[in-house]
Image: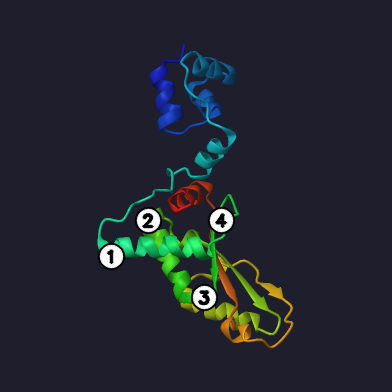
Amino acid sequence: MIPKEKLVVLYTQQGKSMQDIAFKLNCSLHKVKYWMDKHQIPIRTQSEATYIKRNPDGDPFRLVMPRNSDEAKLFGLGLGLYWGEGTKANKNSIRLGNTDPGIIINFIRFLEKFFSIRKKDLKFGLQIFSDVNPQEALDFWIKRLKIKNSQLNKPIITKSRSLGTYRKKSKYGVMTVMFHNKKSRDALIKLLPM
């Protein structure tokens, strides 16, 4: 017999897999499954198991609500930016693109402060026109956002069609900040006034 308390500690609190528990207790996986069922301990979905395995130091996601008026301003700004500029169609990640570094910087501050997302865990994607120097654009964004080159995806280059007014506005392209985490994306979507 495997006591319920032991399974709860190993499986629920420590996040070990049933296979890990079987190995630790020197028994078969079948025996662990049997006692999990017998004690009516809910089994994680494949998605939940993968999430735990990829985050061995605990869940990196934590939503913190604003505690003062300055934080409330940043919170409102971040929600407004995402509502207006964010990609809501992607179900697995938070994405926001803009040509203005200030907007991206403020959105990063919002993610760090209220979603406990570390800047080093963010990814970035740059879209530029073919008449823009890719290295010059990358250098511009790396310097302004204070990010590492390794955080950037390969730039997407779109063929220029004309010399319109948009060209001045997007001299360094459109930068998209991305955080790939369904849990944080779902929490952000729930905060939007829909």
Label 1 – label 3 distance at C-alpha: 27 Å
Q: Which mark is residue 114?
A: 2
Rounded to the nearest angstrom, the CA distance separating label 3 from label 2 is 24 Å
Distance of label 1 from label 4 (alpha carbons): 26 Å
Amino acid type at circle 2 is: Phe
- Badge 3, how many Cα within 10 Å: few under 14, some, many 20+? some
Q: Considering only order in the chain, which callout, 4 or 1, is on the residue closer to the N terminus?
A: 1
Mark closest to the chain's N terminus, 2 or 1: 1
Identify which residue is drawn at 65% across, 71% down. 155
Coordinates of residue 57 in the picture (x, y in percent): 43, 44
In this rendering, would 138 be left or right of 52? right
Asked if residue 128 is positioned above or below residue 13 in the image, the reply reads below
Mark identifier at residue 70:
1
Which structural element holds mark 4? loop
Estimate the spatial distance between the alpha carbons at disc 2 and disc 1, rounded to whole Å.
13 Å
Residue under pointer 3:
142
Q: Is the residue marked by circle 2 packed among few (<14), some (14-19), or many (20+) residues within 10 Å? A: some
Question: Percent position (x, y) of residue 49?
Answer: 54, 36
Could you tell me how far apart the alpha carbons at marks 3 and 4 are, in whole angstroms?
25 Å
Q: Which mark is residue 88?
A: 4
Rendered residue at 49%/60% (across/down): 83
Task: Describe the element under mark 1 as helix, strand or loop.
Answer: helix
Which residue is found at the position 45% from the left and 53% from the top? 193
Three-letter amino acid code of the residue under disc 3: Ile
Percent x, y for residue 131?
Answer: 69, 85
Tag 2 and tag 4, C-beta contact below 8 Å? no
Q: Quadrant of residue 114?
A: bottom left
Mark 2 or 4: the one toward you: 4
Q: Using the image as rendered, state which of residue 45 and residue 189 is in the foreground.
A: 189
